[in-house]
Image: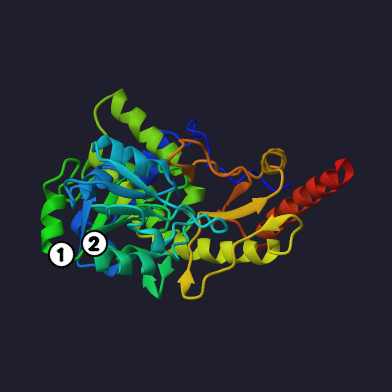
């Protein structure tokens, strides 16, 4: 049977002593400084500079300061973190309507029915941002700052450009992790004025010396070098390692806070490769499922290269499909999209199927087979009872 594609629980069998012994045996090895990692992040995003923050919430808050007053336009259907950031900044919110088929925001709606917003904040909830070129053009005409939250779009491209190259600023994670175990974030910008605003915001992570040196080097040597080499951090149990370090830090002397930062920085090196694998996995799932019964999968948009963390499926009897897939060892996501106006969850007919880049091709096909089987069973039941 196909194993459940989830991270290990925090009760990891890896012990502190085992990690310390492995690290001592192999040595810490060279690790990048924060400046070096941020330089690479900026280059991958096609930007001049990247500024590090201690989490996504801090990065979102800093970006709000790019337009210090006035309303913030958010997608009607988006990540709840966007609405939380606007509320934390006590900013009025306007909602951009969603396309009824793709569920993505519509650039033509910007400024309709009233005064233009002071700031537009967009995300790409499952890593597919085909709307970015249109919004950048519309915001440019009105002189409205555009901020792109690319937390779920690492490696995605739109209009032949990286998703993080759009807007006045874009937020990217410094690690691609399925449960955001390391929330370290970067904001990438081009303008010196925008950089100055960001560097005056709370939550800024200073460059300083190389993080995690000294005692942490022996502890993390094996882990850091493995994460930097391996493009499949899902297999490394990063959530378990984070918990281990947290417990070790509470238990007594010794694991500096920089150790967790060092691990996150090393893992950041694998994010582009993970994004590439997500894209390939998403395309394989799309081709396998596009003709399944009772299913609507959005067609790929020309010029867009998604790096999906989930494949959006529009199905009949979605609640039953989610339950059936869970019973068959295939989890579904419910935390990537919500109605930001009503505070409700995603549309009732939406199922978000996770894209897990560590799966092999034969495992992807088995996932697709189980999804098709669940859809076929639901369709038969619907016909029988209608």
Mark 1 neighbour class, 10 Å CA radius: few under 14, some 14 to 19, many 20 or more: few
Residue at image point 31% right, 24% down: 251
Tell me where residue 233 appears, x and y as whole percent. 46, 52
**Does 9 appear above or below 136?**
above
Label 1 secondary element: loop
Residue 156 vertical position relative to residue 14 in the rendered view, above or below = below
Viewer-side residue, 178 vs 158:
158
Asked if the residue under mark 2 is in contact with the one under mark 1, i.e. CB atoms within 8 Å, the reply is yes
- Which residue is pictured at 56% across the width and 69% down the height? 300
- Residue occupying image coordinates x 43% and y 40%: 341
In terms of depth relative to the viewer, which is nearer, 225 or 170? 170
Which residue corresponds to mark 1?
Answer: 191
Task: Determine which quarter of the picture holds residue 196.
Answer: bottom left
Residue 368 image position (x, y, % from top left): 70, 57
Which disc, if any, is residue 168? 2
Residue for point 19% across, 66% down: 190
């Amino acid at each position: 049977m196909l194993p459940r594609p989830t991270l290990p629980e925090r009760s990891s069998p890896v012990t502190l002593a085992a990690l310390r012994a492995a690290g001592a045996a192999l040595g810490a090895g060279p690790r990048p400084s924060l400046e070096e990692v941020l330089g690479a992040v900026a280059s991958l995003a096609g930007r001049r500079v990247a500024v590090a923050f201690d989490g996504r919430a801090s990065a979102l808050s800093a970006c709000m300061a790019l337009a210090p007053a006035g309303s913030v336009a958010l997608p009607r259907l988006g990540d709840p973190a966007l609405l939380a950031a606007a509320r934390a900044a006590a900013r009025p919110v306007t909602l951009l309507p969603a396309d009824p088929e793709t569920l993505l925001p519509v650039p033509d709606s910007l400024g309709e029915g009233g005064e233009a917003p002071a700031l537009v904040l967009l995300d790409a909830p499952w890593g597919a941002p085909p709307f970015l070129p249109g919004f950048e053009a519309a915001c440019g005409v009105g002189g409205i700052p555009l901020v792109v939250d690319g937390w779920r779009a690492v490696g995605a491209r739109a209009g032949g450009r990286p998703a993080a190259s759009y807007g006045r600023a874009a937020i990217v994670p410094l690690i691609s992790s399925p449960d955001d175990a390391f929330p370290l974030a970067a904001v990438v910008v081009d303008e010196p004025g925008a950089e100055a605003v960001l560097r005056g915001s709370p939550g800024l992570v200073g460059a300083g010396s190389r993080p995690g040196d000294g005692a942490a080097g022996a502890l993390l040597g094996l882990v850091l070098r493995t994460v930097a080499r391996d493009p499949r951090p899902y297999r490394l149990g990063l959530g378990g390692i984070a918990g281990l370090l947290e417990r070790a830090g509470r238990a007594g002397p010794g694991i500096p806070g920089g150790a967790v930062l060092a691990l996150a920085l090393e893992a950041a090196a694998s994010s582009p490769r993970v994004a590439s694998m997500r894209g390939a996995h998403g395309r394989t799932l799309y081709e396998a499922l596009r003709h399944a019964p009772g299913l609507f999968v959005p067609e790929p948009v020309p010029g867009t290269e998604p790096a999906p963390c989930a494949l959006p499926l529009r199905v009949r009897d979605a609640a039953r499909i989610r339950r059936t897939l869970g019973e068959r060892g295939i989890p579904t996501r419910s935390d990537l999209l919500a109605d930001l106006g009503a505070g409700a969850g995603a549309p009732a007919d939406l199922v978000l199927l996770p894209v897990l880049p560590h799966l092999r091709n034969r495992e992807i096909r088995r996932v697709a087979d189980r999804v098709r089987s669940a859809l076929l069973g639901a369709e038969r039941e619907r016909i029988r009872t209608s």
